[in-house]
Image: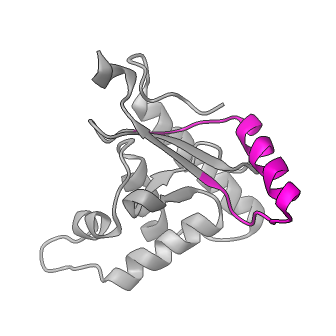
Amino acid sequence: MAKNVFKPQHEHQDCIGEALSRADSICRLRGVKLTQIRRRVLELIWDSHKAVKAYQLLDQLSEGDKRVRPPTIYRALDFLMTHGLVHKVDSLNAYIGCSGAGKEHNAQFYICEACGEVSEIAGQELSMVLDKQARKTGFVIQRQMVELHGRCQQCTN
């Protein structure tokens, strides 16, 4: 099950370390390279549990006269998405680290509209219901992402 970042006892530094370690393992097993720029993009995405836009990453990676170009960021993001290390949160046009990396799953998110925190939730029940309904109509689901917008516990208290 994904960690609930909305809980106060959440240890965020553990998330970053676990995500980078998991990414290293996944890339090694697949025979692909987690280059320095890909790793840094992943680290920046995991730096908070808020969804990050590509141009925010671009600004964070560019230092002084050394500007990173947009294609560099988008190539890194494509790689990270292809290998299941990040998700694109379509409604926000932004990216979030995948807490279930390395496991086949459908993305489901709680998105707090007050503080901007995004939490990936685990639960196959919803996926099974949606798949069953799709089969009834002959629809074949190729990609599933459920985004639930509202307020986290901290913002409702």
Q: Is residue 15 visible?
A: yes
Reply above or below: 105 against 72.
above
**In the displayed image of the protein, which residue is found farthest to the left?**
64
- Which stretch did the figure color magenta? 118-145
Q: Quadrant of residue 86?
A: bottom right
Q: Is residue 63 left or right of residue 77?
A: left
Reply above or below: 1 against 146.
above
Q: Is residue 119 magenta?
A: yes
Reply above or below: 155 against 120.
above
Q: Is residue 137 magenta?
A: yes
Q: Is residue 34 visible?
A: no
Give the residue drawn at x 71%, y 39%: 126
Give the residue drawn at x 40%, y 53%: 45
Give the residue drawn at x 59%, y 44%: 108
Give the residue drawn at x 76%, y 60%: 29
- The location of residue 120, given as percent across then percent down, is 54, 40
Quadrant where the N terminus is found in the figure: top right
